[in-house]
Image: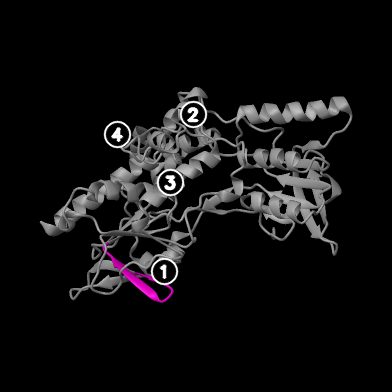
Amino acid sequence: MNSPLTGSDRTYDILGIGFGPSNLALAIAIAEHNADLPPERRLDALFLERQPGFGWHRGMLIDDATMQVSFLKDLVTLRDPASDFSFLCFLRDRGRLVDFLNQKTLFPLRVEFHEYFEWAADRVRSLVAYGHEVTAVDPVRDDSGAVTSFEVVCGGVTYRARNLTVAVGLEPHVPPGAELSERVWHNSQLLPGVEKLLAEGKSVRRAVVLGAGQSAAESVDYLHRSFPEAEVCAVFSKYGYTPSDDSPFANRIFDPEAVDVYFTSPSEVKQSLFDYHRSTNYSVVDMELIESLYASAYREKVTGRERLRFLNVSRIREVCQRADNALDITVEYLPTGDEQTMEADLLVHATGYRPRDFTTLLGEAAKVCLRDDGDAIRVTRDHRVETAPDVTAGIYLQGGTEHTHGLTSTLLSTTAIRAGEIHRSLLARQAARSG
């Protein structure tokens, strides 16, 4: 565990809460900026992460799963193509650059991109305190009553900063009333859960996966391969998996310029853009995986041993856990209302994620944030929360801003660009304060 300097005599220029890809990208921008500057001109930064080390969706790092964004949308390239923190520089460092290029693909393995993130995080480790869970954030007022900084409490340690950057990511979402257990998981628990079952030699005769998106399809495929004797049932309310729209024109919704368009649009246009382009990211599946699953199901039908079943236009009505740890899962076929109850050894909720409520995390500091007519947090174009007039300290959001900045708020597509925008905003505020 890192132990950065603390105390009331030190005030950081920027304190990050959470250290996933978004704040990692910002840490890199700050490290590059500071590299050749004297101490008095540097941005004094620290990032706090509750995990013991860097980790990003570890539970879904399936061995053959690929990224759904180009490797050029890494932590730095769109901000600075010459940066030596790029994915290509990582490959060169690992001795795999030529081998990767020979694949002729824009989409690396997810496990390899995670390795890239770890490589980058290790290079800026002096800016990060792992094992630090934030428990309180309090505004600090000067003699005039203005909020000039925030105190961030991690257990018994307190840090002070003029600006915060909140990047706490997403949290697993499960249907109302669902309870996770040893045999009922969210898909974020998939890999460790399967590894534990295999290590303990526990049999799985039937596994059920609820959901119709990429993670659901990947979970179905992974369980089907991991338990070759088990029946795997996919339950979803659609008629079939919907292909993701990754066509060139649709992908322009992820362009940096699209954020400007979205931000300046009226609320009804924002909603239309969001609805039109949901198929680029929400409840959709890569066509290659759809075709692979269909081919597997058809192959099994031909050979007479059907282990892969798709219960479409259906929903789970009830889950009962028995004394022997088996599950009784009741599935309703929506067109007729007919129900069937199946015995299963495992249920995976591949039902997505939702933004964490950062206002709960901010506590007292959340009271200085302004809200719009719909009670959503007001955010400026440079990703800074609009605050009360007597607040000079800043709160930047990396995520949770779909209502103001569009679909890319929770995606990797503009991570590098957003880091650059926040970095420039911090520099401008530093110059205004010293000038």
Q: Pick whichever, 137 or 378, lies toward us.
A: 137
Read off the magenta span. Answer: 152-162
Badge 2 density bin: few <14, some 14–19, many ≥20, Cα 10 Å: some
State the residue position of label 4.
82
Among the two numbered marks 1 and 2 on one chain, the one whose residue lies closer to the N terminus? 2
Among the two numbered marks 2 and 3 on one chain, the one whose residue lies closer to the N terminus? 2
State the residue position of label 2.
100
Picture quarter with the C terminus: bottom left
As drawn, which residue projects farthest toward the right? Answer: 304
Spatial CA distance of label 2 from label 3 is: 17 Å
Residue under the point 44% across and 30% down: 97
- Give coordinates of residue 82: x percent, y percent: 29, 34
Establish if 194 lies above or below 67: below
What amino acid does circle 4 point to? Ala
Residue 119, disc = 3
Establish if 138 lies above or below 109: below
* CB within 8 Å, label 4 to label 2: no
* CB within 8 Å, label 4 to label 1: no
State the residue position of label 1.
363
What amino acid does circle 2 point to? Phe
Res. 402 in view: no
On screen, residue 346 versus residue 130, left or right, reads right
Among the two numbered marks 4 and 3 on one chain, the one whose residue lies closer to the N terminus? 4
- Give coordinates of residue 324: x percent, y percent: 85, 62
What amino acid does circle 1 point to? Gly
Among the two numbered marks 3 and 1 on one chain, the one whose residue lies closer to the N terminus? 3
